[in-house]
C-alpha cells in the first residue's frame, strides 16, 4: 500500500543495511512518513510459537513475501529456540517481525505491523524521530523530533520503557538492553563517542533493586513501603554509579504504579496528583534542551492523566504537538487553550510539579487558596466545602 505521505526513500547504508534517508527538509514536529501497515499480525489469544509464525508466513501474498525477503533484520541469529522449528524463510520472517515490526493501534495493543518505509528506520540512541499509530484511522507515522535536512538518516529508538529518559541511560545499559532484546550491538554516533565503561557494583545493586521493586507493582502495600527507600538510595548514588538514570527509572515506576491505579480502581482519582508529580520529577532530571515530548509514553501520559486537569498549564503543548498530527486526538484537543509555542523543559517540569491533591477530595487540583496559597483544590465547590476546616489555619501569605 502506498504511503499517504513520505519525505524519505529506502537506501543501503553501512553499517545498518537498508535504511530510510530524507529526500526533503523536515521541521521538528512534522510528519516524515504517514502510511498504513503493509503486513499486520494479530497476537490476540495466541502464543508466538513456531505454529504461529508458520501460519502467518503461509498467509503472506506474493508482494508481502518479496518485501520480507528483501527486509534484512539487524541480527542474523538471536538464539530464540523457536527458530529451530522453522524453515530459513520462516525464521527470517520471525526476526523481521521482532526487530522491524511496530505495535499498531496505540496504547496496549495485540497487533504488530511491518511497513514499507517506517520499518526501515534504524535504531539510534539519539534518535531524530518517533513512531505513533492510530488504529481508528488505520495509519501510522514517523514524526521528526528536531529539524532535519536532505540526506539525513531517519532514526528511532528501539529501547522501550525509557519514558523520555534515554539521554540518562548509560552506554552499558543501552547496549545490554539491545543485545538481550534484539541481539545486536549499537553502532550509533552516541555509542561510538561514549567510553565503554562497565557498570559499577552500586549501579548493578540498584538495577537489581529496581527489578525487585518492579516485581512488587501489584502489591500496593509492599510497593509503597519499598519505593521511598529505593528513591533515597537512587538520590544518594553518584554520577559514576549512574544515579540520575536510576532515579529517573524509579520515578517512572512510581508514575506507572499510580497511572495503573488511576485507571483501574474505583477511587483512582486520588492517584492522579502523585502520578503527575512523578512525571514532573522525571522531567526535572532530564538535561536542559531534552525534548521530553519525543517519547510517546510521556505524550500519552499527558492525555491520560493530565489532560483536562492540567489544561491551564500544559494544554498548549498537547494542542500544538498532537492537534495537527493525529485525527484521533483532535476532539480532545478542542478542550485545550492554544498558544504559539511548545513549553520549555523548565515550564513543563513546573507544570507537572504544580499539581497537588485537592485538600477536600484528594483528586488532582490546580486551584490554590488565594489567601494562604498553600492548599490546592480541584474546584471552587471543593474549596467552599473545605473552608469550615481550613479557615482556622489559613494565614495570609506574605
Image: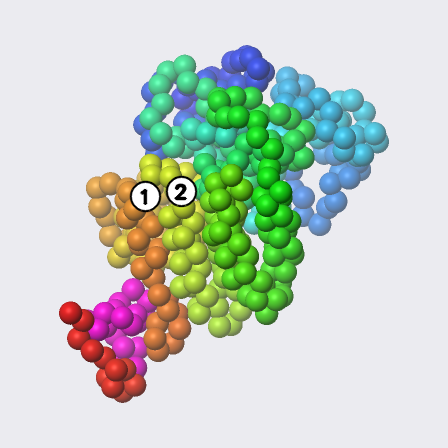
Residue 101 visible here: no
Q: Which mark is residue 225?
A: none
Residue for point 46% across, 19% down:
153
Vertical comparison of 43 with 377: above or below: above
Give the quadrant of residue 48.
top right
Lower position in the chain sequence, tag 2 or tag 1: 2
How busy is the neighbourhood of tag 2: few (under 14 within 10 Å), some, or many (20 plus)? many
| Callout 2 touching callout 1 (CB < 8 Å) | yes
Q: What is the x, y in percent for residue 91?
A: 75, 27
Residue for point 41% across, 38% down:
294
Disc 1, SS = helix
Residue 123 visible here: yes
- The image quadrant where one finds the C terminus is bottom left
Residue farthest along the left direction in this orientation: 398
Vertical comparison of 71 with 337: above or below: above
Disc 2, SS = loop
Give the quadrant of residue 370.
bottom left
Give the quadrant of residue 38.
top right
Residue 75 vs residue 390, the one in the foreground: 390
Residue 378 located within the stretch drawn in magenta: yes
* Residue at the disc numbered 1: 345
Residue for point 46% across, 23% down:
154
Residue 296 located within the stretch drawn in magenta: no
Vertical comparison of 147 with 70: above or below: below
- From the viewer's perspective, is the residue at label 2 or at label 1 nearer? 2
Q: Which residues fall within the magenta stretch? A: 365-386
Vertical comparison of 318 with 22: above or below: below
Q: What is the x, y in percent for residue 357?
A: 37, 69
Side of 79 relative to 380 (left or right): right
* Residue at the disc numbered 2: 286
Amino acid at each position: 500500500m502506498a504511503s499517504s505521505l513520505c519525505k524519505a526513500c529506502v537506501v543501503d547504508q553501512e553499517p545498518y543495511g537498508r535504511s530510510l534517508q530524507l529526500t526533503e527538509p523536515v521541521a521538528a514536529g512534522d510528519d516524515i512518513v504517514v502510511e498504513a501497515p503493509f503486513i499486520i499480525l494479530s497476537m490476540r489469544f495466541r502464543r508466538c510459537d513456531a505454529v504461529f509464525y508458520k501460519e502467518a508466513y503461509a498467509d503472506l501474498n506474493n508482494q508481502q513475501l518479496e518485501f520480507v525477503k528483501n527486509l534484512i533484520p539487524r541480527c542474523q541469529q538471536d538464539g530464540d529456540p523457536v527458530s529451530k522449528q522453522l524453515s530459513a524463510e520462516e525464521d527470517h520472517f520471525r526476526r523481521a517481525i521482532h526487530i522491524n515490526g511496530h505495535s499498531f493501534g496505540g496504547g496496549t495493543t495485540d497487533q504488530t505491523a511491518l511497513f514499507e518505509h517506517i520499518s526501515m528506520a534504524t535504531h539510534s540512541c539519539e534518535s531524530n524521530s518517533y513512531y505513533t499509530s492510530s488504529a481508528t484511522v488505520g495509519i501510522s507515522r514517523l514524526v521528526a523530533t528536531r529539524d532535519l535536512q536532505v540526506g539525513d538518516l531517519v532514526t528511532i529508538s528501539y529501547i522501550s520503557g525509557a519514558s523520555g529518559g534515554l539521554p540518562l541511560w548509560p552506554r552499558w545499559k543501552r547496549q545490554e538492553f539491545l543485545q538481550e532484546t534484539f541481539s545486536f550491538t549499537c553502532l550509533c554516533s552516541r555509542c561510538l563517542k561514549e567510553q565503554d565503561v562497565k557498570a559499577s557494583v552500586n549501579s548493578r545493586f540498584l538495577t537489581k533493586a529496581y527489578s525487585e521493586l518492579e516485581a512488587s507493582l501489584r502489591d500496593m502495600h509492599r510497593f509503597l513501603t519499598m519505593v521511598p527507600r529505593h528513591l533515597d538510595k537512587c538520590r544518594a548514588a553518584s554520577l559514576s554509579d549512574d544515579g540520575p538514570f536510576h532515579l529517573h527509572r524509579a520515578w517512572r515506576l512510581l508514575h506507572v504504579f499510580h497511572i495503573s491505579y488511576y485507571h483501574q480502581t474505583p477511587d483512582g482519582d486520588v492517584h492522579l496528583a502523585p502520578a503527575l508529580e512523578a512525571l514532573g520529577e522525571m522531567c526535572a532530571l532530564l538535561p536542559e534542551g531534552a525534548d521530553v515530548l519525543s517519547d510517546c509514553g510521556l505524550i500519552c501520559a499527558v492525555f491520560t492523566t493530565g489532560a483536562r486537569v492540567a489544561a491551564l498549564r500544559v494544554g498548549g503543548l498537547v494542542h500544538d504537538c498532537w492537534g495537527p498530527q493525529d485525527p484521533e486526538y483532535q476532539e480532545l484537543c478542542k478542550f485545550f487553550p492554544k498558544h504559539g509555542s511548545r513549553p520549555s523543559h523548565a515550564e513543563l517540569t513546573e507544570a507537572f510539579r504544580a499539581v497537588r491533591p485537592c485538600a477536600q477530595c484528594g483528586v488532582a487540583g490546580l486551584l490554590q487558596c488565594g489567601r494562604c496559597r498553600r492548599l490546592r483544590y480541584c474546584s471552587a465547590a471543593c474549596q467552599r466545602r473545605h473552608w469550615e476546616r481550613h479557615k482556622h489555619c489559613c494565614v495570609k501569605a506574605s
